[in-house]
Image (tube, helix red, strand yellow):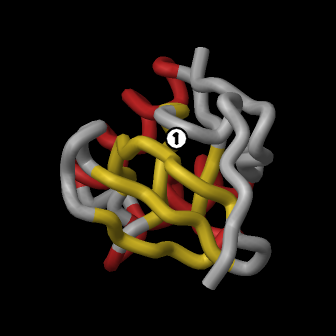
Amino acid sequence: MSRTLSKKVQNTRVVARAFGDEPVLLIARAHLGAAVELAVSESGDSIFFPAGDVYAATEAQLRDLRDAFAAGDRPRLSKLWDAAKPWQPADEIE
């Protein structure tokens, strides 16, 4: 598979909506259209998420998502995910 990486895509921090709606801070390596190549660290193995499950959340939004997930507050967690901004290759977490 051929892909083009831009500097804006490589090593950009993003928030992924993982299993059970758990928010996970990861590093985007490549936007592949319907999928995004992610990693836990710059040198870590790649994992792939659907592009629709990758967000450009602020640190405050990430904290709120983590708090709601940890508390098991599903209604609040759902609202927070609905308000999160879908990630685009030029976005950087604030």
In which image quadrant can residue 85 be found?
top right
> What is the crowding at mark 1: few (fewer than 14 residues within 10 Å), some, or many (at least 20)?
many
Residue at left offset 36%, top offset 42%:
25
Residue at left offset 45%, top offset 33%:
62
* Residue 77 or residue 60, whichever sits in front: 60
Quadrant where the C terminus is found in the figure: top right
- What x and y, as percent, mark residue 10? 55, 38
In which image quadrant can residue 82 be found?
bottom right
The residue wearing badge 1 is 14
- Name the residue at the top extreme: 94
Which amino acid is tagged 1? Val
In which image quadrant can residue 74 be found?
bottom left
| Residue 84 in view, yes or no | no
- What x and y, as percent, mark residue 20? 34, 77
- What x and y, as percent, mark residue 49? 50, 73
* Residue 13 or residue 73, whichever sits in front: 13
- Name the residue at the bottom extreme: 1
| Residue 86 in view, yes or no | yes
